[in-house]
Amino acid sequence: MQIKDKYYKNIERLLYNYNMLKINIEIADKQLEELKNEDGMNAITYDKEKTSPTFKITSQTEDTAMRNIAAEDLIIKRKEKLKNKLEIIKMLLDGLNEAERKVIEMYYFENLQWWKVAYEVKYSERHCKRIRTEAIKKLSVGLYGEKAME
């Protein structure tokens, strides 16, 4: 089975960055925590107070609160998107056989060198690389469907 190169590379990029995606979710949690602790309250100053063409006076506190709410929404959406991506990767990995999953996890997630992967799964390095190639092809079809196949 031939797989289009761009889909193969996209899957490989996802696998290489799996751990960083997990870290990014943790960072998003920290950012949300930081936003919740920030109250946006400042001392009152009248020197910067201006009126708009409609003579509406805005409050710094309200502006800060609105910015915090918008930032929080953005972080929550980004975090959900990342969680969904990780969940998809987990689902795809469940579709692989044990040897394929082990090779993928050890090489991409644990960053082991090929000789270490080969030692752990008790295959040659060459065979492990073939297993990886076939596994990525399966993952490509799982994620992109028929359009991944040439």
Image (spheres, rainbow, N blue to C red):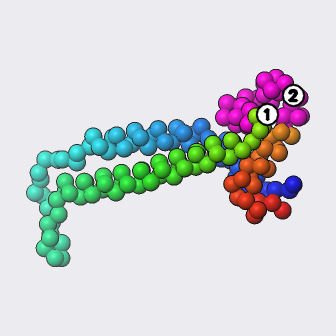
On the picture, is 54 further left or further right than 118?
left
Instruction: Tell me, yes or no, if residue 6 can be seen here.
Output: no
Which residue is rendered at x = 16% and y = 59% of the image? 59
Range drawn in magenta: 101-129
* Callout 2 amino acid: Tyr
Element on which disc 2 rests: loop
Type of the residue with mark 1? Ala
Q: Which residue carries the number 2 mark? A: 123
Q: Which residue is located at x 11 percent, y 51 percent?
A: 44
Residue corresponding to mark 1: 99
Asked if residue 66 shows in the view, the reply is yes
70 sits to left or right of 144? left
Secondary structure beneath dot 1 equals: helix
Quadrant that contains the C terminus: bottom right
29 shown above or below 142: above
| Mark 1 surroundings: few (<14), some (14-19) or many (≥20) residues within 10 A | some
Q: Does the magenta stretch include residue 120?
A: yes
Q: Do the residues labelled 1 and 2 touch (CB within 8 Å)?
A: yes
Q: Position of residue 107 (x, y in %)?
A: 73, 34
Q: Which of 148 and 142 is in front in this view?
A: 142
- Which quadrant of the rendered structure holds the N terminus? bottom right
